Structures are given as structure tokens and as C-alpha cells.
Image (cartoon, rainbow, N blue to C red):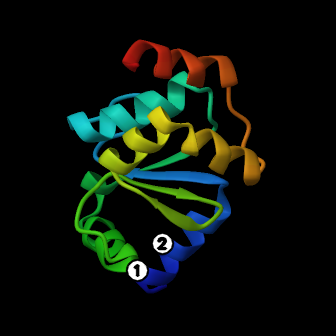
């Protein structure tokens, strides 16, 4: 299977997928840790893909999304953004809206707490 097909299958097989350095339980960079931390804190069920484990995936995901950095968050097969975009969307409430519109379960109280702590 071509790497692009493998990535497409991955992003469409789960509602929420995070391509990251490390894993959701052991992130290996600050940016990946921040996004995984937000998703974990908000109680979002997500699949994690460790790009450090496979150089083809590491480069392939950048080509697939035409986005130069990792982490990369996908919701319902659509690329949402990297660390800065996810941080902004979390603080503005846009991430809550995206999850709600796509039927992704999350803890609204936790999302509100993030905004309160950073407000």
C-alpha cells in the first residue's frame, strides 16, 4: 500500500487522529505534548500515530496535508491544524464547535476550565 493510501486509511478510520512525535501517553516534543494534553484533558477519544517510528509516515503526513510540521490533528478525515492552530481553537471555543458539529464526544467542563485558566 502506498504511504498516501495508508495515511488516508488512518485519518478516516477514527473520528480523531493525531500525528505526533511520540504517543499520547508519552509525547516526545512540547508541541505534540500540548495538543495531546488538550485532547486528553478534554476526554477526547483519539488515535495517535507516532511519526518517529516510521520515516515514511513522518514525511508522508507532511506531503499529505501540505503542512510542514507535526503534530497534525485530523477530525473526521479532515486536517484541522498543528499546535498553534489547535491552541487558538481551544481558547476561542472553535474546537468545541468542531467536535460538536462532527459528533465527537468531549468534556465541555474541561474545555471551559482550559479557557478559564488561560483567560
Q: Is residue 62 left or right of residue 88?
A: left
- Residue that label 2 marks: 7
Q: Position of residue 23 (x, y in %)?
A: 38, 39
Q: Residue at x 23, y 66 (%)?
A: 55
Q: Name the residue rendered at 32%, 33% in the picture.
A: 33
Picture residue at 58% right of the left edge, 26% below the top: 42
Task: Name the residue at the right extreme.
Answer: 103
Q: Position of residue 89 (x, y in %)?
A: 47, 44
Q: Which residue occupies the foreground of this view, 115 or 61? A: 115
Q: CA distance from mark 2 to mark 1?
A: 6 Å
Q: Is residue 29 above or below residue 76?
A: above
Quadrant occupied by the C terminus: top left
Q: According to the image, label 1 marks what residue?
A: 3
Q: Position of residue 24 (x, y in %)?
A: 43, 35
Quick one: label 1, few (<14), some, or many (20+) residues within 10 Å? Answer: some
Residue 14 versus residue 95 in the image, above or below: below
Which residue is drawn at the image coordinates 45% and 33% (left, top)?
A: 91
Q: Quadrant of residue 64?
A: bottom left
Residue found at the far bottom of this picture: 2
Q: Nearer the viewer, residue 109 or 19?
A: 109
Label at residue 40? none
Q: Confirm whether residue 24 shows in the render.
A: no
Disc 2, disc 1: CB below 8 Å?
A: yes
Q: In the displayed structure, would residue 26 be above or below residue 79?
A: above
Residue 100 appears left or right of 58: right
Circle 1 — which element? helix
Is 2 drawn above or below residue 52 in the view shown?
below
- Residue nearer the viewer, 118 or 79: 118
**Residue 52 on image: x %, y %:** 25, 53
| Secondary structure of the residue carrying numbered label 2 | helix
| Residue 43 appearing in the image | yes
- Which of the two residues, 89 or 27, is positioned nearer the viewer here? 89
Amino acid at each position: 500500500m502506498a504511504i498516501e493510501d495508508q495515511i488516508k486509511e488512518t485519518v478516516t478510520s477514527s473520528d480523531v487522529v493525531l500525528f505526533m512525535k511520540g504517543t499520547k501517553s508519552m509525547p516526545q516534543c512540547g508541541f505534540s505534548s500540548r495538543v495531546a494534553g488538550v485532547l486528553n484533558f478534554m476526554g477526547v477519544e483519539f488515535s495517535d500515530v507516532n511519526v518517529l517510528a516510521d520515516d515514511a509516515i513522518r514525511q508522508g503526513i507532511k506531503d499529505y496535508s501540505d503542512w510542514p510540521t507535526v503534530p497534525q490533528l485530523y477530525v473526521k478525515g479532515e486536517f484541522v491544524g498543528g499546535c498553534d492552530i489547535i491552541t487558538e481553537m481551544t481558547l476561542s471555543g472553535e474546537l468545541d464547535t468542531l467536535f460538536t458539529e462532527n459528533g465527537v464526544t468531549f468534556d465541555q467542563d474541561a474545555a471551559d476550565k482550559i479557557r478559564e485558566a488561560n483567560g
